[in-house]
Amino acid sequence: MTIKPLGDRVVIKMVETEETTKSGIVLPGSAKEKPQYAEVVAVGPGGVVDGKEIVMEVKVGDKVLLSKYAGTEVKLDGQEYTILRQNEILAKLD
């Protein structure tokens, strides 16, 4: 099954973070902070959303920064994704 976002929505997959600190301390799952960067998996068509013309500025494969609590988390075929609006993305990474 594939996800095809509508309007100005973007589907992202969070990038896995290290499980140990620089000093070698292993962090349990509850102590790990939610990552703030992800990879774009699917992009909606944009168009007119809420009366405004939206041009999609991200594409599949882009690495992006986002706020900690942005979007809605979904699980599909054993994979975890986050669906959010393009305006919740803070920046693209090069």
Image: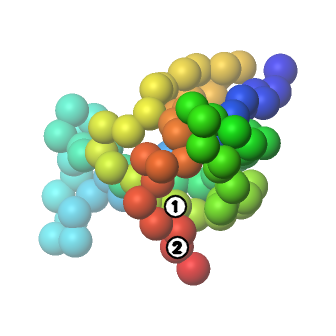
> Of residues 24 and 55, which is closer to you in this image?
55
Are discs 1 and 2 less than 8 Å apart at CB? Answer: yes
Where residue 61 appears, as percent x and y from the top left, is 71, 60
Disc 1 residue type? Val
Query: Can you say whether 51 is above or below 68 in the image?
Result: above
- For the point 63% across and 29% down, the residue is 79
> Of residues 28 and 79, which is closer to you in this image?
79
- For the point 48% across and 26% down, the residue is 73
- For the point 69% across and 39% down, the residue is 48
Where residue 51 appears, as percent x and y from the top left, is 60, 36
Where residue 59 appears, as percent x and y from the top left, is 73, 58
The reply to whether residue 62 is in sight is yes
> Of residues 79 and 94, which is closer to you in this image?
94
Looking at the image, residue 70 sits to the left or right of residue 80; the answer is: left
Disc 2 residue type? Leu
Q: On the image, numbered disc 2 is attached to which residue?
A: 93
> Which part of the image, by quadrant, shows the N terminus?
top right
Earlier in the chain: of badge 1 and badge 2, it is: 1
Q: Secondary structure at mark 2?
A: strand
The alpha-carbon separation of the residues under discs 1 and 2 comes to 6 Å
Q: Secondary structure at mark 1?
A: strand
Q: On the image, numbered disc 1 is attached to which residue?
A: 64
